[in-house]
Image: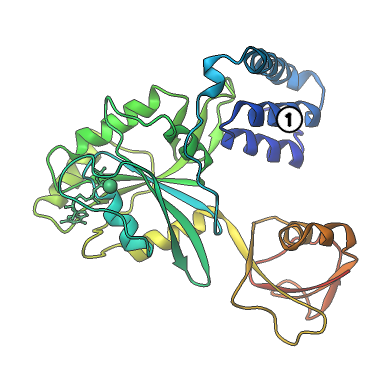
Amino acid sequence: MPANLTAQYHKAEEQYRRAVMPDEQLRCLQEMLREMPKHKGTDKLQSDLKQKISKLKKELTSGSKSTKKGTGIRIPRQGAGTAILLGGTNSGKSQLLAALTRANPEIAPYPFCTREPLPGMMPWQDITVQVIDTPPITADYLESYMQGLIRGADLALLVIDLGSDDGIEQCQEVLDKLNSTKTRLASDSYLDENDIGLSFTRTFATPNKIDSAGAVERLELLHELCPLDFPEFPVSATIETGLEPLREAIFHSLDMIRVYTKLPNQKEPDYDRPFTVRRGGTLLDVAEQIHKDYVQDLKFARVWGSDVHDGTMVKADYVVQDKDVVELHT
Ligand SMILES: Nc1nc2c(ncn2[C@@H]2O[C@H](COP(=O)(O)OP(=O)(O)OP(=O)(O)O)[C@@H](O)[C@H]2O)c(=O)[nH]1
Ligand SMILES: [Mg+2]
């Protein structure tokens, strides 16, 4: 990746990685091109972007079929981030959703039970993370909207069935199927350097049904036959083993911090409803979430937190820290 790309560029790039609709992709690519420092080191990237932009423009004006690709189901983002459950049929995705959240999906011992994605909210300390259950992925079955959901998620949880001898093969099928598309799984989220249409979503492996007979041996076999480059969290969704470390790791992977806000005339902040921003985010990012007027009208804030003296006056560019209490003044 060429040097000196601005924060705005990275923001647009992340939006592009998540964008499903062609008009949204076009807007992000144009923003990336605008934000890109124009020098020799970025020549290749600039020409890639220009090519992509002109191709998308053509597709949009001709109304070709590929511009309709990715339409379908969209799930509004909620909570501090989104994790998507992926896996072969019967691996226990729906059971895991039920164990992690208060959602009530259909769970059944027969294949292809789940037909539509279903979100639930997973509590972790005083915040929540959205978890989405999905239909299975097999060698010949991948719902058209799945790529959009995977790109839009912060994290994928690859559920592997340790209760059946077919589990490892099913897992390989899921990976192969996604590798045949431009939406793939990796140990981190990024766009391919040489093909910016190719998106990778950060993934955890969650071998499930660790409670069942032969599961430990199957897990060893998985490591041998299908070594995965993802952090691994063996779980049992039915007897709820291993869920706490998984919850914790999901939250940490989001790299979000919590900020509590209070009004100048309030004694105590609203501890029940923290705002969450990506680590490295500023006071302005918090203000944006409260109300757009706050962004324009914000004069200063007082902060109580680990890095500052109580009540320190800060400006909009102050980098907030986890559990800061901020009092915004307009
Ligand atoms: N022993 C055991 N059984 C489990 C576990 N998790 C799920 N199951 C069982 O496995 C079967 C399938 O579970 P589901 O959650 O419906 O599987 P799924 O991955 O959602 O399946 P599809 O929707 O068809 O893709 C059910 O009979 C569950 O009770 C587990 O941790 N241990
Ligand atoms: Mg299911």
Q: Position of residue 7 (x, y in %)?
A: 75, 42
* Location of residue 26 with respect to 79 vertically, above or below: above
Position above or below: 280 against 85: below
x and y percentages locating residue 17 in the rendered image: 58, 34
Query: Viewer-proximal residue, 178 or 121?
Result: 121
Q: Residue furthest left?
A: 213
Image spot of residue 58 (x, y percent): 66, 12
User: Which quadrant of the view contains residue 169?
Assistant: top left
Q: Is residue 287 left or right of residue 213?
A: right
Q: Residue at x 19, y 51 (%)?
A: 108
Secondary structure category for the residue under label 1: helix
- Quarter of the view holding residue 5: top right
Q: Amino acid at mark 1?
A: Met
- Figure quadrant of the C terminus: bottom right
**Does residue 150 appear in this view?**
yes
x%, y% of residue 318?
A: 80, 62
Q: Is residue 237 left or right of residue 129?
A: left
In this figure, which residue is indicated by the disc labeled 1? Answer: 32
What residue is drawn where x is 74% and y is 26%?
30
